[in-house]
Image (spheres, rainbow, N blue to C red):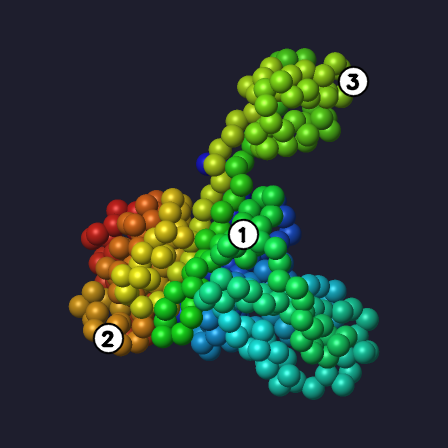
């Protein structure tokens, strides 16, 4: 499978949570949590179209000000997705600044904030520079249950888990990859041209074999005669889980959301022997992270958000993960 999404833990396994998900062939990126972003170049931050916030604890949200500072003066709409209360949190952050000169900016900046509530309902609002970032209610998007973003090329789903407060876990799922083999097209005496777009769309949509495919300058042919020109691969699935209690309910719900995940970024904040401390603070141990990965059938597990109590002991926590999960680093 050719990877089109390239994830990077901005602050490694021990710093503030922030996963930068880059798109290979687009000037676009996602952020999962917005911790300290000083290690992320400005050019990358400015590609972020959507940020997915698990919850608004300081280490998961403090980087919002960095995004704001870099984006002021640019025409942009940045979408934020998170749990109930995110609209108020964004509004309060923006209200901490004085915007009496907002009308002097030629370029408008807008944040569109979507909340996913525990009962599955949603709220959405827009906060624009030209309106001094006063929250303007918007109709909730018409999306499938648990889905935050649904586009032809990918979708992002979430589930609400328990961190003594609601906390979202996320799954990014690409659509299938369709690769046209140029050598096969040319061997058939067919042109490389615009007709390949609708052809790929017909394959992707599951059109029947007798569908007529128009070919630039040539007679149309049924889809069945052209299927060998393209190969179809399933898209990549990436999961992100952090700051949840190691309860059976949480582990089950996370495993279901992340079923079939290729890469799972999952907190492993505490060593297995410190399970009591982890439970008290609402975090996962290395063993609990492994259990989520197992239930999800993850191919690769990337543990992170190690507690500061294990400073300079990354190898210790990684060994615990590797002991029970072969797909760990």
Give the mark count. 3
Q: Secondary structure under badge 2?
A: helix
Q: Residue at x 65, y 21 (%)?
A: 211
Name the mark on residue 2.
none
Left or right of 91: which side holds 21?
left
Q: Which mark is residue 144?
A: 1
- Name above or below for residue 104 compared with residue 238: below
**Which of the pair 46/270 is nearer the observer?**
270
Residue 112 x %, y %? 64, 66
Relative to residue 268, is residue 210 drawn left or right? right
Q: Nearer the viewer, residue 213 or 298?
A: 213
For the residues labelled 1 and 3, the Cα–Cα distance comes to 41 Å
What x and y, as percent, mark residue 302? 36, 55
Disc 1 versus disc 2: nearer the observer: 1
Q: Secondary structure at mark 3?
A: loop
- Residue that carries the numbered disc 3 in the rendered image: 217
Give the vertical position of 238 relative to 48 (above or below): above
Q: Earlier in the sequence, mark 1 or mark 2?
A: 1
- Disc nearest the viewer among 1 and 3: 1
Residue placed under numbered mark 2 in the picture: 277
Element under disc 1: loop
Q: Residues within 10 Å of mark 3 (few under 14, many from 20)?
A: few
Using the rendered image of the protein, determine whether residue 302 is visible from the camera's viewpoint: no
Corner quadrant of residue 108: bottom right
Earlier in the chain: of badge 1 and badge 3, it is 1
Position in image of residue 224 (x %, y %): 58, 17
Q: Residues within 10 Å of mark 2 (few under 14, many from 20)?
A: some
């Amino acid at each position: 499978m050719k990877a089109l999404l390239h994830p990077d833990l901005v602050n490694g396994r021990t710093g503030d949570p922030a996963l930068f998900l880059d798109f290979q062939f687009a000037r676009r990126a996602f952020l999962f949590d917005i911790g300290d972003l000083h290690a992320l170049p400005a050019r990358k931050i400015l590609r972020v179209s959507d940020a997915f916030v698990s919850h608004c604890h300081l280490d998961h949200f403090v980087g919002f000000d960095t995004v704001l500072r870099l984006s002021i003066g640019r025409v942009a709409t940045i979408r934020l997705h998170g749990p109930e209360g995110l609209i108020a949190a964004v509004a309060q952050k923006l209200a901490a600044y004085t915007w009496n000169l907002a009308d002097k900016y030629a370029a408008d900046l807008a944040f569109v904030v979507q909340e996913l509530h525990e009962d599955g309902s949603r709220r959405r609002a827009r906060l624009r520079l030209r309106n001094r970032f006063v929250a303007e209610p918007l109709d909730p998007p018409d999306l499938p249950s648990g889905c935050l973003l649904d586009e032809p090329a990918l979708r992002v789903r979430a589930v609400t888990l328990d961190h003594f407060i609601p906390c979202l876990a996320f799954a990014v799922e690409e659509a299938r990859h369709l690769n046209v083999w140029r050598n096969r097209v040319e061997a058939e005496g067919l042109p490389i041209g615009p007709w390949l777009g609708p052809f790929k769309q017909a394959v992707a949509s599951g059109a029947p074999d007798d569908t007529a495919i128009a070919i630039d300058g040539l007679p149309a042919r049924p889809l069945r005669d052209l299927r060998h020109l393209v190969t179809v691969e399933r898209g990549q699935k990436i999961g992100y889980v952090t700051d949840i209690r190691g309860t059976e309910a949480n582990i089950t719900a996370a495993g279901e959301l992340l079923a079939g995940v290729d890469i799972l970024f999952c907190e492993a904040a505490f060593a297995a022997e410190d399970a009591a401390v982890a439970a008290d603070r609402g975090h996962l141990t290395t063993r609990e992270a492994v259990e989520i990965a197992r239930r999800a059938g993850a191919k690769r597990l990337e543990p992170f958000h190690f507690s500061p109590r294990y400073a300079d002991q990354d190898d210790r926590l990684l060994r615990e993960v590797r002991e029970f999960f072969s797909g760990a680093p």
